[in-house]
């Protein structure tokens, strides 16, 4: 039986993209204040307005009232926590986990495979989506595939395999995703939140246009002047056309965040 005051739990999150940010916000609002996030040096989030990895460029980012701050070393975590902020550190090798020894480690990279997360990293290790097996390389897995089982906490076995098909929004799946037509530099003059029509040119990769397939709003888009590879996901058109959705956590990220909260309480509130 493991009992510990919520205020004493230290939680490490690998990744600071959209899903990781949804988790961090859900936990922070549930009074888990000792959270830190680890990112690569040049993250390429599409849903940048709701991704704490943007602190790598912007220094501070606020999502639904929760503030994240870039820090340079683990010694800076305490300062950020003292200011009610979530520290985000460039730490692609997760050295902070070995140094801090958190109670919980959450792999929220969404790489569709395990990049090295293992059971020895913490008393509770949680993996998101395909690539993890509960009871083998993590203690619990959270189902990330949209549908009936989204957010299910898996205690033994694997989640559903990667379908390769984006989630259905208003009847659209692959059509709503913008991909690089070639390798090169992505350039655009349009911002996230811009309303677009089918066949609009939203930008270029070198001299090849990036063309929308549906009407909607640019809900997400990688940074201007970013080098990309052919077929990389570089944007997301939301057919619902609601600009507010560009700056708020999605229902999927919110559901997964709630499931991670459940997983932690299962372990530490028994």
Image (cartoon, helix red, strand yellow):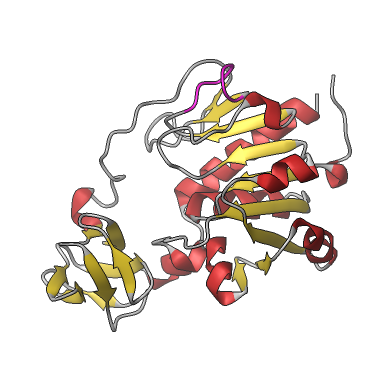
Instruction: Tell me residue 95's x, y (percent).
Output: 68, 46
Magenta: main secondary structure = loop
Q: In this rendering, is residue 142 above or below 83?
A: above
Q: In this rendering, is residue 159 above or below 102?
A: above
* In-image side of 53 versus 29 (left or right): left
Which image quadrant for residue 5? top right
Instruction: Tell me residue 146's x, y (percent).
Output: 38, 38
Q: In this rendering, is residue 260 above or below 28?
A: above
Which residue is painted at 50% across and 34% down in the image? 151
Instruction: Tell me residue 221's x, y (percent).
Output: 35, 67
Res 57 visible:
yes
* In-image side of 60 versus 112 (left or right): right
Which residue is painted at 45% across and 66% down in the image? 48
Q: Which residue occupies the foreground of this view, 147 or 180? A: 180
Res 241 visible:
no
Q: In this rendering, is residue 247 above or below 110?
A: below
Instruction: Tell me residue 153's x, y (percent).
Output: 56, 27
Q: Quadrant of the C terminus?
A: top right
* In-image side of 206 versus 74 (left or right): left
Q: Which residue occupies the foreground of this view, 252 or 44? A: 44
Which image quadrant for residue 67? bottom right
Which residue is painted at 71% across and 42% down in the image? 97
Count how many numbered circles sit on residues in the image. 0
Q: Quadrant of the N terminus?
A: top right
Residue most extreme to the bottom: 189
Which residue is painted at 46% across and 21% down in the image? 158
Q: Is residue 78 magenta?
A: no
Q: Which region shows up in magenta?
A: 132-138
């Amino acid at each position: 039986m493991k009992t510990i005051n919520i205020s004493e739990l230290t939680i490490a999150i690998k990744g600071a993209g959209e899903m990781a940010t949804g988790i961090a916000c859900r936990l922070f609002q549930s009074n888990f204040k000792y959270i830190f996030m680890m990112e690569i040096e040049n993250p390429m989030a599409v849903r940048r307005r709701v991704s704490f990895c943007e602190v790598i460029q912007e220094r501070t980012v606020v999502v639904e009232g929760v503030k994240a701050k870039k820090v340079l070393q683990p010694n800076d975590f305490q300062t950020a926590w003292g200011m009610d902020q979530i520290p985000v550190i460039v730490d692609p090798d997760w050295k902070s986990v070995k140094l801090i020894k958190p109670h919980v480690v959450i792999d929220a990279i969404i790489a569709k495979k395990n990049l090295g997360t293992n059971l020895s990293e913490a008393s509770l290790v949680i993996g998101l989506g395909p690539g993890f097996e509960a009871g083998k390389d993590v203690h619990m897995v959270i189902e990330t595939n949209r549908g009936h089982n989204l957010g299910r906490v898996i205690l033994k076995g694997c989640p559903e395999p990667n379908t390769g098909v984006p989630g259905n929004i208003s009847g659209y799946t692959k059509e709503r995703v913008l991909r690089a037509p070639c390798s090169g530099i992505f350039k655009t003059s349009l911002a996230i939140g811009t309303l677009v029509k089918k066949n609009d040119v939203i930008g270029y990769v070198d001299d090849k246009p990036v063309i929308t397939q549906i009407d909607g709003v640019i809900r997400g888009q990688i940074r201007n002047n970013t080098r990309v590879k052919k077929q990389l996901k570089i944007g997301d058109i939301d057919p619902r056309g609601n600009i507010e959705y560009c700056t708020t956590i999605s229902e999927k990220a919110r559901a997964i965040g709630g499931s991670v909260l459940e997983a932690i309480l299962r372990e530490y509130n028994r």
